[in-house]
Amino acid sequence: MFFIGFPLFASVSVFAKGKQVINIAYLMQTQKVRPPLSSLDPIIENKGVLGAELAIEDNNTTGEYTRQAFILKTFMVPADGNVADTFNKDIAKKYSYVVTNLASGLTNSVADLPAAKDMVIFDAGTVDDSLRGKQCRANVLHLLPSRAMRADALAQYLMKKKWTKWFLAIGTTQEDMLYAEAVKRAAKKFNMTIVQEKSWEHTFDARRTAQSDVAVFTQIDDDYDVLVVADEQGQFGEYLDYRTWLPRPVVGTQGLLATAWHRTHEQWGATQIQNRFKERAGRWMEEQDYGAYLAVRAIGEAATRSQSNELKPIKDYILSDQFALQGYKGTPLSFRTWDHQLRQPVLLAAPRSMVAVAPIEGFLHPKTELDTLGFDQPETQCQWSKSSE
């Protein structure tokens, strides 16, 4: 394990002198990098941390006026390292706010550690509905849209286009199955029809055989309006466009995709942060960068408004009706009290263009249209939430 302190300040004591200090830990584990599907795809190993560093800059800009200093320290655990050991040794009893970019199982493992009970963990890396549902934790806040939110965003757009008949193509990984479940839930929720679902089980290289195999794979008895793909690892989804038996659009994990952030997003000040991030990082902002940015900015916003660096007033403000986080999406973002999911618009993007932003106009909700995406309060399976109602 090694850690990287926030590089802009050589002396933390000088920087924070006379100011209210808010210390934030960023915890991530290095993932084993899979070979890219295409030589055009860059290998990015530092997703997330650069977004957190950019947010620290923004927090400290405001902190100059509020007499507050925000200090970030990043802890990177090797792929074969022990995340719990790093947490207990370097973070426990030293930090109240921890931003994590970890696998789903590790996120809850960290949240369940005894020392984490008196912390707020900002999950900036997962999309699992289970972590917002049956496996929810009261000390965890989730920054990225869940799979259910993404599937609902796509469903709203497809309903607007009257593309109501779907052919669902599913990969073989557990993540693909979970995404497919979210798609099937969205289809039922918005009264769509999945005319057929098939698993992509070819074990050979799709790049070499796609022209013939995709046509055969997509030749089904029923007609359909759109091909919905569940391929989170990108093993075959990129090769479906223009090769299907019928000329149909591709959506889902490839083609038109639902995402928290995308390089084609330019509205509501997004161009400014896109340029700032690219100048700093030398690459485009990824979803994990955006999630980490929002996490650190949420802490900054709550600390500024509550005029405190203490855990209780900051957490209380974050979960209050007064909390409003600007996320460059045209509307303030806030946390759902029943599952701690950050409610937010979801971008619908093609590789080189922004197509739409969900919620789509016309989908109404008694509280906020943002709650038409994902699990609403009556649907939640979060047990600590239900027990507190």
Image (spheres, rainbow, N blue to C red):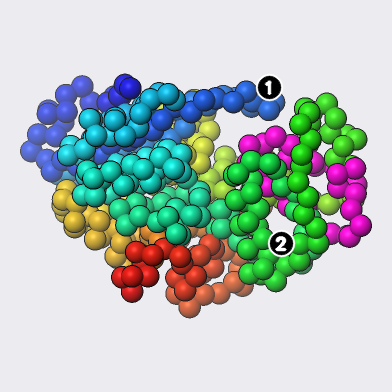
Q: Is residue 103 above or below residue 344?
A: above
- Among the 4 quarters of the image, the one containing residue 181: bottom right
User: In the rendered image, is residue 120 in sight?
Assistant: yes
User: In the rendered image, is residue 332 in sight?
Assistant: no
- Among the 4 quarters of the image, the one containing residue 3: top left
Taking the image as shown, residue 108 lies to the left or right of residue 351, namely left
Tell me the tag on residue 122: none
Residue name at image x 68 percent, y 28 percent: 37
Label 1: which secondary element:
loop
Tell me the tag on residue 158: 2
Q: Nearer the viewer, residue 256 or 34?
A: 34
Q: Position of residue 80 (x, y in %)?
A: 42, 24
Q: Is residue 278 above or below residue 110?
A: above
Q: Position of residue 23 (x, y in %)?
A: 21, 39
Disc 2 and disc 1: Cα gap in Å? 32 Å
Main SS, magenta residues: loop
- Among the 4 quarters of the image, the one containing residue 305: bottom left
Q: Which residues are magenta?
A: 216-245
Q: Nearer the viewer, residue 368 or 328?
A: 368
Question: Quick one: label 2 or label 1, which is nearer the N terminus?
Answer: 1
Taking the image as shown, residue 341 lies to the left or right of residue 220, namely left
Tell me the tag on residue 39: 1
Q: Position of residue 374 (x, y in %)?
A: 53, 62
Label 2: which secondary element:
helix
Residue situated furthest left in the rendering: 18
Q: Is residue 344 magenta?
A: no
Which amino acid is tagged 1? Answer: Ser
